[in-house]
Image (cartoon, rainbow, N blue to C red):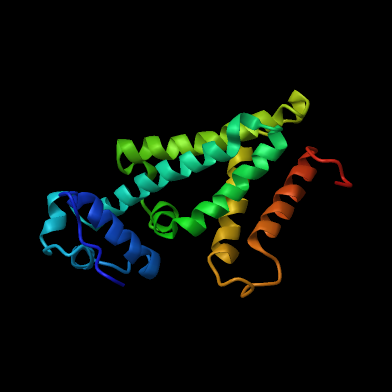
């Protein structure tokens, strides 16, 4: 792993980027502040100008990750076009794409144990990402009679759990190492089974 160094005086972001490399490789408990400083090519004391400790650094990585995640989900959703169902499925695929493209952020967000309320900024970023899922679930729920609609937040949480499980078990492994099906196929069929069970899809679809 090559040293990153930092430019234009942006020490804080250099440390975040160094820690993202470390956390993606070693996990949330597998790196120290000193290692992040070394990778950023600064002194061991330098990180403490911006972060009280490793947990605060991880929380900042998670905050940036949730901001990126929310942007990606919002782009995928595109105001429900061309249909709420297609947009909903696009949100699920965006979940997998994010985990692949930003593994360090993903680990900080979902595997580090950091609490969403660790800071106001982190809480706001987390809420913005979740709101896209809730909005997608609410729009799709309009296809059902009111008395058959599941609670919107629960609906969104179920889809998030399905997506997260597939990421953990399949998307982060080497292709083909966990089975013959791609994560995308598993996600599509899993969401399809869930939506069919709720009555969103015809049984033969």
Q: Is residue 51 visible?
A: no
Counting from the top left corner in percent of width and height, residue 37 is at 19, 63
Q: Is residue 84 visible?
A: yes
Q: Is residue 47 above or below residue 133?
A: below
Q: What residue occupies the far bottom of the structure in this picture? A: 177
Q: Residue at x 57, y 48 (%)?
A: 94
Give the left or right position of residue 116, taking residue 7 as reference.
right
Q: Nearer the viewer, residue 40 or 190?
A: 40
Counting from the top left corner in percent of width and height, residue 46 is at 12, 57
**Quarter of the image holding residue 63?**
top left
Give the left or right position of residue 173, taking residue 199 as reference.
left
Give the left or right position of residue 138, taking residue 64 as reference.
right
Q: What residue occupies the far front of the structure in this picture? A: 8
Q: What residue occupies the far right of the structure in this picture? A: 204
Q: Nearer the viewer, residue 60 or 152?
A: 60
Q: Residue at x 60, y 40 (%)?
A: 156
Give the left or right position of residue 48, taking residue 185 as reference.
left
**Quarter of the image holding residue 84?**
top right
Q: What residue occupies the far top of the structure in this picture? A: 146
Q: Residue at x 31, y 43 (%)?
A: 118
Q: Residue at x 34, y 64 (%)?
A: 21
> Which quadrant of the rendered structure holds the N terminus?
bottom left
Number of numbered discs present? 0
Counting from the top left corner in percent of width and height, residue 97 is at 54, 53
Q: Nearer the viewer, residue 103 or 141?
A: 103
Counting from the top left corner in percent of width and height, residue 51 is at 19, 51
Q: Nearer the viewer, residue 152 or 99?
A: 99
């Amino acid at each position: 792993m090559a040293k990153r160094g930092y430019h234009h005086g942006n020490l804080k972001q250099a440390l975040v980027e160094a820690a993202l490399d470390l956390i993606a490789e070693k996990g949330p408990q597998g790196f120290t502040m000193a290692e992040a400083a070394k990778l950023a090519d600064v002194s061991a004391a330098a990180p403490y100008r911006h972060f009280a400790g490793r947990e605060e650094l991880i929380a900042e990585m998670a905050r940036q990750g949730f901001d990126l995640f929310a942007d990606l989900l919002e782009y995928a959703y595109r105001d429900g076009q061309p249909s709420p169902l297609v947009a909903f499925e696009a949100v699920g695929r965006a979940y997998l794409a994010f985990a692949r493209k930003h593994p360090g952020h993903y680990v900080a967000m979902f595997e580090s144990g950091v609490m969403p309320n660790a800071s106001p900024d982190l809480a706001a970023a987390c809420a913005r990402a979740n709101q896209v899922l809730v909005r997608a679930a609410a729009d799709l729920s309009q296809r059902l009679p009111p008395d058959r609609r599941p609670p919107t937040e629960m609906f969104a949480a179920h889809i998030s759990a399905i997506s997260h499980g597939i990421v953990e078990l399949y998307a982060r492994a080497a292709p083909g190492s966990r089975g013959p099906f791609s994560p995308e196929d598993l996600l599509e069929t899993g969401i399809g089974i869930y939506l069919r069970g709720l009555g969103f899809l015809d049984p033969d679809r």
